Amino acid sequence: MAEKKEITVKATQREGRGKNDSRRARRAGQVPVTIYGGQGEAVAALAPLSELAAILRSDSGRNTIFTLDVDGVGPAEVMFIDRQIDPVRSRLVHADFKRLVKGEKIEATVPLRLVGEPIGVREHAGILEQIVREVEIRCEPREIPEHIDVDVTNLDVHEVLHVSDIP
């Protein structure tokens, strides 16, 4: 489950808006972020790149729930909605967060993990091909699993497992 690990990221409100201001912030180790949803207006802020990158590298990745404390606005529990990565430097360029509201269900992307060795591979020299590697689920933020295990031990050659077959 995506549980709150008491992570708090300090952020500052963003003054300027535009390409040059964003470049200056990135050069200083900050990432422009926007916080949407929940109760309140959208907030533009700057957060430390190192802390956000550490959250994305964690086991729960972008499904991590953490507190973003913006100066002048206050703390809010958030989760990544979207992120932009520089394709050359593989660095976080911008992030959008969703403010979480207790009792509200959200959509999250969860990876699928295949468990077991299929009969078709073991006995008939078949090849297991995985087309879908993650699925969208709708649940409460605290109930997001890190992955969904899918048992493939009973699959024979030319058999297919559909997303609808996943419990």
Image: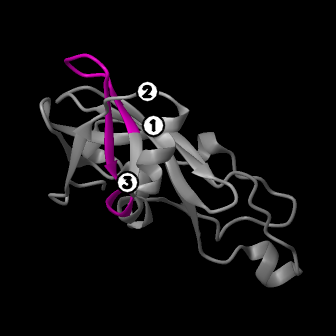
Structural crowding at the residue carrying mark 1, measured as other residues with C-alpha within 10 Å and reported as few (<14), some (14–19) or many (≥20): some
Report the disc number at residue 30: none
Judge by depth and name the residue closer to the eye, 126 or 106: 106
What separation in Å lies between label 1 and label 2 (alpha carbons)? 6 Å
Ranked by sequence position, the earlier of labels 3 and 2 is 2
- In the rendered structure, which amino acid carries the disc numbered 3? Pro
Q: Position of residue 143 (x, y in %)?
A: 29, 46
- The vertical placement of 106 against 37, above or below, is below
Which of the two discs, 3 and 2, sits closer to the camera? 2
Q: Secondary structure at mark 2?
A: loop
- Asked whether residue 72 is in view, the answer is yes
Q: Which residue is mark 3?
A: 145
Q: Which residue is mark 1?
A: 21
Give the residue at x 51% y 53%: 92
- The vertical placement of 40 against 93, above or below, is above
Q: Would you say residue 43 sits in the magenta stretch?
A: yes
Q: Which residue is mark 2?
A: 17
Q: Position of residue 45 (x, y in %)?
A: 31, 36
What separation in Å lies between label 3 and label 1 (alpha carbons)? 38 Å
Q: Position of residue 128 (x, y in %)?
A: 79, 69
The part of the image, by quadrant, that contains residue 118 is bottom right
- In the rendered structure, which amino acid carries the disc numbered 2? Arg
Judge by depth and name the residue closer to the eye, 150 or 4: 4
What separation in Å lies between label 3 and label 2 (alpha carbons)? 36 Å
In this rendering, the count of numbered labels is 3
Q: Which residues are magenta?
A: 33-52
